[in-house]
Image (spheres, grey):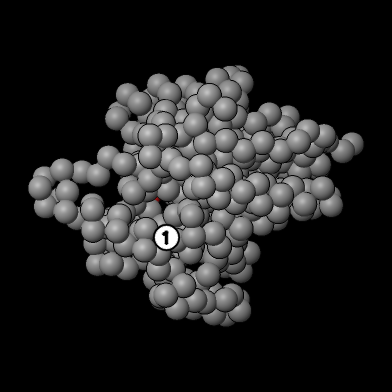
Amino acid sequence: MTLPYALAIHGGAGVMPRASMTPEFSKECRAALKRAVAAGEDVLHRGGAALDAAIESVNVLEDEPLFNAGRGAVFTTDVTHEMDAAVMDGASRRAGAVAGIFGPRNPVTLARAVMERTDHVLLIGSGALRLARDAGLPFEEPPYFYTERRRRALEEALALRANGQTIDDPALRHGTVGAVARDRSGNLAAATSTGGVTGKLPGRVGDTPVIGAGTFADNRSCAVSATGDGEAFIRLCVAHEIDARVRLAGQTLEQAAAGVVMDDLTRIGGSGGVIAVDARGNVTTPFNCEGMYRGWVVEGDTASVAIYHDE
Ligand code: ASP
């Protein structure tokens, strides 16, 4: 029996606040989100696998300098980029992830290589880069990843920090990209990729590559990709907590995701959101902050993209 496919993507909770959003920037972001939905949907429409669809969407978002992943990643305090990414296949519960890497054009593709070409789940450092070279993945030089917007965000973060303050503009502070999909065979998958948070200490790893925190997929319940304050997402095991509520507590996907994001995350002072799809193809995208760049499509319907709450 074939089932209708479903796909959701996000370009992170680090959105431009509504007060400073311009029509041009909003248009650019929405167009990029549409391209990412279309890329993943194309795979699903041709009968492809959820994992391929999720990675295809994330590749588009990584190549897009608007979002904090791949090209356009934020800077560490050393003015370097360190990227994290993960994939998980809900059918086999196999997963792959990389942390703190720099060089590969598409960190999420390297995460997939970890899953498919090694016995491990998480690789860092020179070993991760060696795998990328062995797998023939494309590398880029620093100018490819450099964006003036992220450089200015770092200066601002460091200036505020010198005064004992923290950056409160989400667009300057953080961001991530991700996708979750359910294919026509009923398989679920999740993929997430990020530059982390602006002005992070070199060596800091967020929730994205931590399986069960920022990325998770299990055919029995749901696939989840998160964005927001990584440390809070790790402490709450957000993605796995949503899975557990669906699988063990009998909650609907919407109840489970909203409970974790709106209640638990808010309670510990964390900000952000998730995109999630369940085994029945339901999609939910809760966030407890001003906005989350996002898009979704269910087979038979037209694709939607949105940034703020009331869309
Ligand atoms: N969760 C990411 C991290 O902490 C950042 C984000 O999604 O905004 O690395």
Q: Amino acid at mark 1?
A: Ala
Q: Secondary structure at mark 1?
A: loop
Image coordinates for residue 12, horizontal then vertical, percent: 47, 44
Residue 290 position (above or below residue 175)? above
Which of the 4 image quarters holds residue 59?
A: bottom right
Residue nearer the viewer, 35 or 4: 35
Q: Which residue is mark 1?
A: 73
Give left or right: position of 223 versus 4.
Answer: left
Residue located 59% across and 75% down the image: 137
Residue located 35% across and 26% down the image: 266
Image coordinates for residue 116, horizontal then vertical, percent: 63, 64
Residue located 57% across and 80% down the image: 134
Q: Is residue 30 visible?
A: yes
> In the rendered picture of this protein, how many numbered marks are placed on residues?
1
Q: Quadrant of the C terminus?
A: top right
Give left or right: position of 133 versus 232.
Answer: right
Q: Is residue 95 visible?
A: no
Image coordinates for residue 36, horizontal then vertical, percent: 64, 51
Give left or right: position of 178 versus 290.
Answer: right
Q: Quadrant of the N terminus?
A: top right
Residue nearer the viewer, 253 or 179: 179
Residue located 42% across and 34% down the image: 18
Residue 50 position (above or below residue 255)? below
Circle 1 residues within 10 Å: few <14, some 14–19, many ≥20:
many
Residue 17 position (above or below residue 115)? above
